[in-house]
Image (cartoon, rainbow, N blue to C red):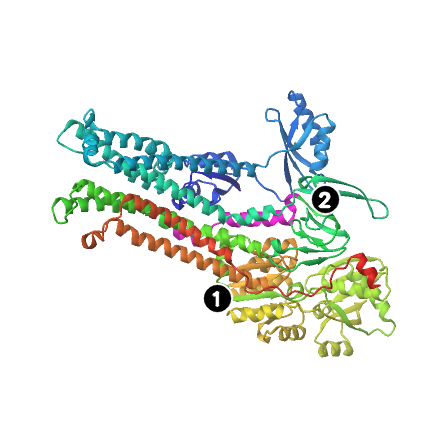
Amino acid sequence: MCSFRVGGMHCSSCTSAIESMIGSVPGVSSVSVSLLNEIAEVVYDPKTLTEEDVLKEMQGTGFQVLLLDKACQEVDTVVLNVGGMTCTSCSSAIEAVVGGVDGVLEISVNLALEKATIKYDPDKTGVRSLMTEIQDLGFSASLATNDDSSAGQEKEQEITRTKRVLVVCLIVNIFLMVIMMLDNGEMESMMHASFLFGISFMNLLQWCVATPIQFIVGRHFYIGAYAAMKHCRPDMNVLVVLGTTSAYLFSCFAIVYGAFHPEYHPDVFFDMSAMLIPIIVLGKFLETLAKRKTGEAITKLLQLRATTAILVELDKYQNIAEEKIIEVDLIQKGDLLKVLPGTSVPADGDVIIGHTSVNEAMITGEPMPVRKVVGSQVIGGTINQNGVIVIKATQVGNNSSLAQIVKLVSEAQVNKAPIQQIADRTSAYFVPVVVGLAIVTFFSWLYLSSSGIIAIPSNTTPALFALTFAISVVVISCPCALGLATPTAVMVGTGVGAQNGVLIKGASDLEKAHTVTCCVFDKTGTLTEGAPKVVNTFVLDSYMNETELYRFVGAAESGSEHPLSTAVCKEAKALGITTFPHVSDFQNEPGMGVRCVVDGHSVLVGNFSLMKTHDVTLSGRATQIFADTSYTTIFAAIDNQIAGVICLSDTVKAEATEAIYHLQKMGIECWMVTGDRHAAAVKLGKELGLGENNIMAEVKPADKANKVKELQNRGHVVAMVGDGINDSPALAQADVGIAIGAGTDIAIEAASVVLIRNNLLDVITAIDLSKKTFNRIKLNFVFACLYNFISIPAAAGMLYPIWQVQIPPMIAGLCMAFSSVSVVLSSLLLKRYKKPFSAITRLEPPILDDVEVELIN
């Protein structure tokens, strides 16, 4: 995939043109163009095309195209300013030395620009180390300006230029209006008298004013129209050019004709040309300002990032021995950072000294501060409130949580929602239909006014009267509102989601989530805390005590990361077992348990299926325990003889029952899928408010995706909520995969929606936000369609025969601008979204400083 920044797009016709032209190129798999972000992403077959081939095809569309650098999660890229280079030997030396540093994957030094671009592995090296290597060679090194900020500066400069143009046009038009107001009495005869080559002063003045506005201020409309017609994909530019140019050329023809025929007093449309283009530019300017607000979510997230950090070194007594202030971009993995009260946490990390409360509302949407003690994890960009802490940086650069959130939101805003295809298909035919309507309007009114069927005002002619209606039809019609209906709502919706702790990866996922009819929950770590505890142990071997049993079972389970294994190992340590015997031939059997050899003895630890698979005969006591208990049961067999039974229980999450209750009230079926035996699963299901028929028990990890598929085959739109590696196939199979943010990276990668907090109430937030966003999209579509259905007939003169109502072209231009701006403002109303439920907040004991502790003591 390669990405491009595309300039010069005005409406969905432009995006459709690019997608149509590039999509038809052999070797191109898919094309996605975002009108708002001005980004195009092209997926292509490298065996058929190269990146340069795709770039040439993109440039052939007639738009301004710039190839963007590829982003890679595993590789960070830094651009450094390098001073002191005098020749290619200097740049070669830097490339040779820095290129040899462990972790540097690629380096390119530009002598003319005095910049070095370095791609590196952040696990092996960092920006500070790279700068030191360059400085050791005798050159200066500093961080270069980010390309994105440069692009932002260019946009700001363009907005400033547009403001100046609008001010000049306003002054010119005010001057023109004043002159026209003076056009009465003796002044009238003087201004309309022949001034030069039979042309009156008034007409010549209007001609001189209108010409630079038509061809200088409006030049980008002509450039866009030419590119659109070149590829037979007419867009809004074509409509603007047709409307204003026809008025301008008609006026020019009238003046020239009047110069050779003194008896003819020409009526001109130069004022329309001079005023209409600035009005349209003003509309696009207001639209740009409004669209900028739809992307404020990413801007706000980026503003959370600290600019500096306090790097510290500790002595052997864990006291701060040295500290210095560095730029946040220079933080490397493993750095120790001091965080003062009231400042932003500079990087993701673990607290190693101190305790505090951290406000994570800007990341998770939860207003209550979260207590942080030694061992707690902190997120870069959150606010430290009332204590001094020292953290150890664990994720920096592009791998930090904040960077990943920004990346996910940015990608989601580039992707198109399926409903956008309606607007794309409509806009492809919109402009030709409008042009056809304008032609029909012109000739209809020309016939009606010339034949006397319709009486026209005395100060006009049939041709001028008919042309006014035709121009109004062209100008008032605009596919922009249709094109903006979906992407603006998606941008605001995904941004609001990120600010409320819900990351939606794409527009299609946002659209799909509102149709969910069934929600499947994984049990361990999703509905439960994922930290089961041993509640009972039965030793069935008369030659073995409980400690001896746990020596074997703990050794076997120490090779597994499953929560049940962790609980067993924890119980073994509680019995005083500090070291486990030697383990060999370890084998994990997914969905059943483990088998291995411990001190020369064959050991099996797992569920009933594991025992059955390896032909272990359960004693009557073991069978009775298994039948009587409703806890999760683990069997232990040594040398194929049953040695013990361990019963475990997991704690249900505080908000799980409430989340399921509210989902069911919303009409969404809730299911639980687990590998636990049926009795234990049913007991937990009752606690959660789930019926026995909605429990999928004794399901192996590999079969979870099949269970999701079964529900889909019944006609359900399925959302799967999970957190573990074994949930990934089910998350991918589901229509909407929802991963708990505290889960594994693989599960998060496979999901469509990521909940930053480990809180199931955010499942309701994700579905509710999807419904609100999709309803806003539909409202935008309805408004855009109604606007055109009502405005085009009105502009064509349908109201004139009865009420003599006529929409002048200038008013039509304002209406066109209003349609686009109103759709954007409608989408911006989503920023007022509030969560349907706030998270259940556990009461934490107050954090006391050392003085308070001493007083209490």
Looking at the image, which is closer to me, 788 or 248?
Answer: 248
The residue singled out by tag 1 in the image is: 715
Query: Taking the image as drawn, is residue 424 in sight?
Result: no
Q: Amino acid at mark 1?
A: Gly
Q: In the rendering, at what x and y percent does residue 11 appear?
A: 40, 44
Of the 4 image quadrants, the one containing the C terminus is: bottom right
> Is 162 displayed left or right of 627 in the figure?
left
Looking at the image, which is closer to me, 844 or 122?
Answer: 844
> Is 297 displayed left or right of 258 in the figure?
right
- Residue 415 on the magenta span: yes
The residue singled out by tag 2 in the image is: 333
Q: In the rendering, at what x and y percent does residue 408 appear?
A: 57, 49
Tell me the quarter of the picture where residue 783 sits: bottom left
The residue lying furthest to the right in this view is 543
Q: Is residue 410 above or below residue 776?
A: above
Residue 65 circle label: none
Examine the residues drawn in magenta and state their main secondary structure.
helix
- Highlighted range, magenta: 397-423
Q: In the rendering, at what x and y percent does residue 469 appear?
A: 24, 45
Query: CA separation, marks 1 and 2?
Result: 48 Å
